[in-house]
Image (spheres, rainbow, N blue to C red):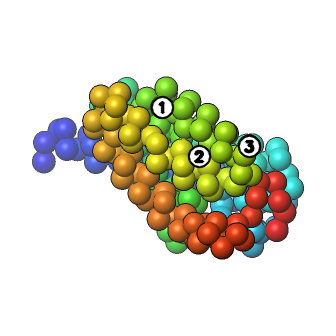
């Protein structure tokens, strides 16, 4: 096994461990609220934390889930270069979606997606946030905002001549959409929960 392969595997593993830290669950337990998995959608991400009515915890969860992707990418990249950074980014995203500590039942990946994107190509992360905000203001649907913003990212990266990143984020976007399949069904049915609404 070559040194390059070892670095990529180690970067992926490091990213996975970072991504699998369930900040939403940890923070809500520390705050003494009910088990986050019994609230709203049962998701461990910031949007569902917001449904507990605690905006501070929701913001902290968002920041934690975002930064774990960024930290994984930046740390791996500083040691192993761009390919290691992308391997860590993929690992961090998969770690959030399928954390070993929670029986591989994790979040839907939006904040970590942004964090990975921030570490790899920050202008696209800013564009994601701008698109998300515009759609959220108009629709009040967090899920729809994330779906639309994530669909734009691979195209934006490709047009910016970042082909490898475009492929990576096409894969991440596909996984994000798959994790949001129930949200998509509820959006079509008109039963999706809106931002800030307690369940």
Foreground of the two, 131 or 90: 131
Q: For the residues marked 1 and 3, what is the alpha-carbon distance in whole angstroms?
A: 20 Å
The residue that label 2 is drawn on is 111
Percent across and percent down for residue 90 are: 39, 48
Please indicate whether residue 14 sits to the left or right of residue 44 in the image.
left
Foreground of the two, 42 or 25: 42
Please indicate whether residue 119 sits to the left or right of residue 141 in the image.
left
Percent across and percent down for residue 190 are: 70, 69
Helix, strand or loop at mark 1: helix
Q: Residues within 10 Å of mark 3 (few under 14, many from 20)?
A: few
The residue that label 3 is drawn on is 137
* Mark 1 or 2: the one toward you: 1
Percent across and percent down for residue 61 are: 69, 47
- The image quarter containing residue 154 is top left
Location of residue 54 with respect to 78 vertically, above or below: below
Helix, strand or loop at mark 2: helix
Tell me which label, 1 or 2, sits earlier in the chain.
2
Percent across and percent down for residue 131 are: 59, 38
């Amino acid at each position: 096994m070559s040194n390059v392969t070892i670095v990529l595997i180690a970067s992926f593993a490091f990213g996975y461990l970072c991504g699998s830290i369930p900040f939403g669950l940890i923070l809500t337990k520390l705050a003494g609220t009910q088990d986050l998995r019994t609230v709203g959608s049962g998701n461990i991400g910031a949007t569902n934390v917001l449904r507990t009515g605690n905006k501070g915890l929701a913001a902290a969860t968002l920041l934690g889930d975002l930064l774990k992707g960024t930290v994984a990418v930046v740390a791996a990249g500083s040691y192993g270069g761009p390919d290691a950074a992308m391997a860590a980014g993929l690992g961090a995203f998969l770690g959030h979606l399928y954390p070993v500590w929670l029986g591989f039942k994790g979040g839907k990946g939006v904040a970590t997606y942004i964090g990975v994107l921030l570490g790899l190509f920050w202008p696209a992360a800013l564009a994601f946030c701008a698109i998300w905000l515009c759609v959220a203001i108009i629709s009040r649907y967090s899920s729809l905002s994330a779906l639309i913003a994530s669909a734009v990212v691979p195209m934006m990266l490709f047009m910016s001549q970042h082909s490898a990143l475009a492929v990576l984020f096409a894969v991440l976007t596909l996984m994000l959409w798959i994790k949001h399949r129930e949200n998509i069904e509820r959006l079509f049915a008109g039963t999706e929960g809106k931002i800030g609404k307690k369940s």
